[in-house]
Image (tube, rainbow, N blue to C red):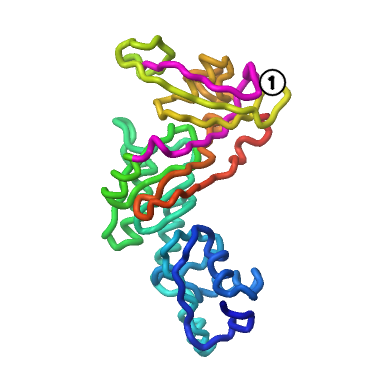
């Protein structure tokens, strides 16, 4: 391990990460006697690369097997000033600004973003350009000089928000979708009313009519699919509750229908299955975390997005 005085070393130091975490954590492991403040400064001064690319964010997510290098300091002040923001880094920063969607994790195989409410996951007959897919596609093409594109792995409702995974190649997409049933999906939802118990499970069958409205039906009905939803009350003692929701199946509008039709506690802001507009933007449904197998390494990883600010004051 490097000692604290290694901040002034004259040769570069390289290592391959063994665990997932942040870039700050990885560099701290390389320099176990250095302070967090010193490491953050090192990263923000563009002295650290991940697989050959400068990363200036201490919270940048890294996965096992990535090559991290701390560059040598032996450059004069003027040279460091000129090279502190190389064209590639400026280009990446500009691409992220134009993306205008928070990236939670990114590597050569996938990109996980925090989808904002009100944005379609993919195009429809009425809207073909203002979609998350289009925005992320443009970002990936720009940052890989057109060498990569993206593929949809799963979707979120237009008015829902939170963690969404996209693949950067077809092989990664196939592997992710093949194992998607084993992914752990956790949502946060604010509902009108209170479920009958502090925690429980809804297990029934869902159908979709010609108007594309999903409803609870009997087992065996043509087109019926089993849907399983687990819920737990996290907060609230008035007319609303904040719930943690875990789904075993990923049926269309599953959480919304189970909350409204089975528990009689519709999600706040749901204009289709609930009570309609409530002053909040979109519906109060947020994909809080996804745990899944990485398509290249097979390692189990979890990506999270905190409860959005728009939920504040609803409970």
Query: Which portion, as a residue range, is magenta?
Result: 179-207
Q: Position of residue 33 (x, y in %)?
A: 64, 75
Front residue of 259 and 68: 68
Q: Residue 259: name its quadrant.
A: top right
Which residue is at 47% across, 63% downward?
18
Q: Quadrant of residue 230?
A: top right
Q: Is residue 142 above or below residue 116?
A: below
Mark 1, residue position: 239
Q: Is residue 98 magenta?
A: no
In the image, residue 48 sits, relative to residue 300, either above or below, namely below
Magenta segment main secondary structure: strand
Instruction: Where is residue 160? Give x, y as percent.
Output: 49, 34
Task: Left or right? Give the position of 239 relative to 293.
Answer: right
Horizontal relation, residue 231 to residue 238: left or right: left
The residue sitting at 43% across, 35% down in the picture is 156
Residue at 41% x, 59% y: name it.
Answer: 95
Q: Is residue 280 above or below residue 296?
A: above
Q: Residue at x 68, y 29 (%)?
A: 315
Picture coordinates of residue 161 (x, y %)? 50, 38
Local SS, label 1: loop
């Amino acid at each position: 391990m490097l000692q604290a005085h290694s901040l002034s070393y004259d040769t570069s130091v390289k290592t391959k990460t063994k665990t997932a975490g942040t870039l700050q954590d990885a560099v701290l492991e390389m320099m176990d006697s250095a302070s967090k403040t010193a490491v953050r400064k090192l990263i923000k001064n563009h002295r650290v690369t991940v697989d050959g690319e400068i990363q200036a964010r201490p919270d940048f997510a890294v996965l096992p097997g990535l090559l991290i290098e701390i560059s040598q300091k032996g450059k004069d002040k003027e040279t460091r000033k000129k090279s502190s923001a190389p064209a590639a880094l400026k280009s990446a920063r500009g691409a992220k600004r134009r993306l205008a969607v928070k990236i939670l994790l990114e590597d050569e195989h996938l990109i996980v973003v925090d989808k904002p409410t009100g944005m379609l996951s993919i195009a429809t007959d009425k809207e073909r350009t203002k979609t998350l897919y289009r925005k992320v596609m443009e970002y990936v093409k720009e940052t890989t000089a057109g060498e990569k594109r993206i593929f949809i792995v799963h979707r979120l409702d237009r008015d829902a928000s939170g963690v969404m995974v996209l693949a950067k190649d077809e092989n990664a997409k196939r592997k992710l979708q093949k194992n998607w049933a084993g992914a752990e999906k956790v949502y946060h939802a604010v509902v009108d009313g209170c479920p009958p118990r502090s925690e429980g499970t809804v297990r029934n069958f869902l159908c979709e009519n010609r108007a594309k409205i999903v409803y609870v039906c009997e087992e065996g009905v043509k087109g019926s699919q089993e849907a399983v939803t687990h819920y737990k009350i996290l907060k609230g003692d008035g007319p609303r509750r904040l719930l943690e929701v875990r789904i075993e199946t990923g049926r269309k509008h599953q959480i919304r229908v189970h909350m409204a039709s089975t528990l009689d506690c519709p999600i706040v802001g749901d204009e289709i299955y609930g009570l309609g507009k409530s002053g909040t933007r979109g519906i109060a449904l947020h994909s809080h975390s996804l745990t899944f197998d990485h398509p290249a390494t097979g390692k189990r990883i979890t990506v999270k997005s905190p409860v959005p600010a728009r939920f504040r004051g609803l409970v």
